[in-house]
Image: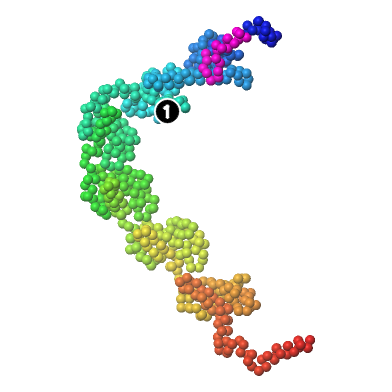
């Protein structure tokens, strides 16, 4: 160690010079790709010699095999690796051969993309939306969209798998390291000149005979013309009727005449139409009248209704709200089948929007009108409970589809309505009276208590001030519970209405079953409300006595009326 301490020593100076010259030639930097020479191979690992590193990097043999470098696993071979760390926490050098290969491969892809050159690759697997292509030179993976596989729709691409072929780089994402390629662009480039010559022969208005349908997309159908050109018929040009997908009216291999409606020589595209070969059925829409019934064919069933055809190409909307009089959420799927013919009534014709709205329920008998004819307001009949909620019953009458509404307050005169409601269950029979019918709103209201005798009829000939005899049913701290004769209703006499004198206003004066006279203090026939009072009778009798015999102070005008007061005062003075 002494030789390195004394820099004046010639040997030390010579060593320093050699060391500096060596380091100046070799640039060791993390994150760079460097070359290593294999100097040792074991069963699991490969040891590399890299000039300038203080220790030997180690690579797993499986890593080299996975990237296709198995034939280079021998002493003396050179391998490119990415220097990840010069020294980790264990003092070892970290390198990666696979990452180095990916970086080199990406650099090659970038160079090819910038030079607009194709790359060699092979399709190794299918994936959602397309396929995965492997770059033959570097093993980098690239995405091939389904639309870029070929210049014509392919049902099967098995014949293209693992076959080396050219691909055009159409997109590179340098940030994410993603590459997108196209096989279609390579194929089309060879056909471009020939395709331009073919398109030159077409002009708008031409008729193409017997074009064959070769594929579908969400926006239209593709047809092949004489095996030399593919043309597109857009979804809107397939039919005057509503079409959601071409497979609703076309089949692969089906032949059809087409009309050329557009020619784009720059994009080498020809647009065609099927519907323009036939007259527009909406032109004679005046042949149809509002509120008149016609026969229509169900062409499509949806969650919100159905589309029906009045004639070929003339489609109407049948909304679910117009399917049934009684079902709020009627389902067209349960009511109709495809191509079934049904009667419909036209409700709306909008020429500007080319829209026709129809109704199926208007062609059927309105059950609410039938109900009002068979069971007018005031009629009584028997019904069956079909369902209930927390405040009402729904009942069905005979064979009619209508469910009438019976509120819990219309169940009984005597008990609490909600408590009475708990006594009923589905399937129970109940006598009802029709209270209200609203055909326009599709509502029927019925009641059960209206079929019973109203206990309040006892008071129909009574008025305020009348006196009635009642029977005491029971007593409590709040007052008396009484019931009039021949009446099933009980009434409460409050403690404050028992007597004028508070000392006499004791409910305990009665034990039950006693008869007593009470006055009708208040009565409302509309609200079916009565206030009974014993105190009211006492006050009325007192007022009548005072009116007949004078005021309460009239006795003070008699002689000696103040004698007791004078004697009391005299006794107080003596004391």
Give percent across and percent down for residue 307: 31, 45
Q: Residue at x 27, y 30 (%)?
A: 264
Task: Identify which residue, 495 or 279, lies in the foreground.
Answer: 279
Q: Is residue 95 above or below residue 345?
A: above
Instruction: Answer whether residue 32 is magenta in the image.
Output: yes
Q: Is residue 63 visible?
A: no
Find residue 169 and report its image quarter: top left
Give percent across and percent down for residue 530: 51, 74
Q: Is residue 78 visible?
A: yes
Quadrant in the picture for the N terminus: top right
Please identify the residue farthest to the right as the structure is shown.
575
Tell me the element at label 1: strand
Magenta extent:
16-35
Give percent across and percent down for residue 470: 54, 77
Task: Identify which residue, 188 or 509, lies in the foreground.
Answer: 188
The residue tagged 1 is 127
Q: Is residue 565 above or below residue 161?
A: below
Q: Is residue 58 above or below residue 438?
A: above
Give percent across and percent down for residue 380: 39, 66
Q: Residue at x 56, y 79 (%)?
A: 536
Q: Is residue 21 above or below residue 350?
A: above
Q: Residue at x 51, y 10 (%)?
A: 77
Task: Identify which residue, 209 or 481, lies in the foreground.
Answer: 209
Quadrant in the picture for the C terminus: bottom right
Q: Residue at x 33, y 39 (%)?
A: 244
Instruction: Answer whether residue 210 is magenta in the image.
Output: no
Left/right of residue 374 with respect to residue 570 in the rendered view: left
């Amino acid at each position: 160690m002494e030789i390195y301490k004394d820099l004046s020593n010639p040997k030390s100076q010579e060593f320093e010079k050699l060391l500096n010259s060596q380091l100046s030639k070799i640039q060791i930097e993390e994150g760079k790709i460097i070359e290593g020479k294999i100097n040792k191979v074991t069963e699991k690992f490969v040891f590399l010699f890299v000039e300038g590193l203080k220790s030997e990097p180690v690579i797993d043999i499986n890593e080299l095999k996975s990237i296709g470098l198995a034939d280079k696993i021998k002493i003396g071979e050179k391998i490119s690796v990415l220097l990840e760390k010069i020294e980790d926490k264990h003092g070892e050098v970290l390198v990666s051969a696979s990452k180095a290969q990916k970086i080199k491969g990406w650099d090659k892809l970038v160079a090819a993309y910038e030079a607009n050159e194709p790359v060699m690759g092979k399709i190794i697997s299918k994936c959602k939306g397309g396929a995965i292509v492997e770059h033959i030179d570097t093993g980098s993976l690239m995405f091939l969209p389904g639309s870029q596989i070929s210049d014509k729709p392919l049902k099967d691409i098995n014949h293209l798998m693992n076959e080396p072929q050219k691909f055009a780089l159409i997109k590179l994402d340098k940030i994410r390291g993603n590459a997108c390629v196209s096989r279609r662009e390579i194929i089309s480039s060879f056909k471009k000149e020939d395709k331009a010559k073919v398109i030159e022969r077409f002009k708008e208005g031409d008729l193409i005979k017997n074009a064959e349908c070769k594929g579908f997309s969400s926006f239209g159908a593709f047809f092949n013309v004489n095996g030399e050109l593919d043309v597109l018929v857009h979804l809107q040009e397939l039919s005057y009727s509503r079409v959601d997908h071409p497979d609703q009216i076309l089949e692969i291999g089906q032949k059809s005449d087409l009309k050329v409606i557009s020619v784009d020589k720059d994009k080498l595209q020809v647009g065609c139409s099927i519907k323009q070969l036939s007259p527009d059925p909406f032109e004679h829409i005046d042949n149809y009248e509002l509120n008149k019934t016609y026969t229509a064919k169900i062409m499509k069933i949806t969650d919100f209704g159905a589309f029906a055809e009045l004639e070929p190409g003339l489609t109407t909307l049948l909304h679910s709200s117009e399917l049934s009089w009684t079902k709020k959420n009627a389902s067209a799927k349960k009511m109709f089948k495809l191509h079934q013919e049904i009667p419909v009534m036209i409700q709306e014709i909008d020429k500007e929007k080319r829209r026709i709205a129809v109704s199926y329920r208007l062609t059927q008998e309105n059950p609410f009108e039938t109900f009002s004819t068979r069971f007018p307001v005031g009629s009584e009949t028997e019904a069956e409970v079909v369902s209930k909620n927390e405040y009402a019953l729904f009942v069905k009458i005979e064979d009619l589809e209508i469910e009438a509404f019976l509120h819990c307050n219309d169940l009984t005169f005597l008990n609490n309505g909600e408590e009475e409601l708990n006594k009923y269950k589905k399937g129970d029979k109940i006598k009802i009276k029709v209270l209200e019918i609203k055909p326009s709103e599709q509502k029927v209201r019925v009641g059960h208590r209206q079929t019973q005798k109203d206990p309040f009829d006892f008071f129909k000939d009574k008025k305020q001030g009348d006196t009635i005899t009642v029977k005491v049913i029971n007593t409590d701290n709040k007052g008396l519970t009484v019931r009039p004769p021949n009446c099933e209703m009980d009434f409460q006499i409050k403690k404050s209405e028992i007597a004028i004198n508070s000392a006499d206003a004791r409910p305990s004066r009665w034990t039950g079953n006693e008869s007593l006279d009470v006055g009708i203090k208040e009565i409302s026939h509309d609200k079916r409300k009565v206030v009974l009072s014993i105190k009211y009778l006492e006050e009325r009798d007192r007022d009548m006595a005072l009116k007949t015999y004078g005021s309460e102070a009239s006795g003070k005008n008699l002689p000696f009326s103040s004698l007791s007061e004078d004697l009391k005062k005299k006794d107080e003075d003596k004391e």
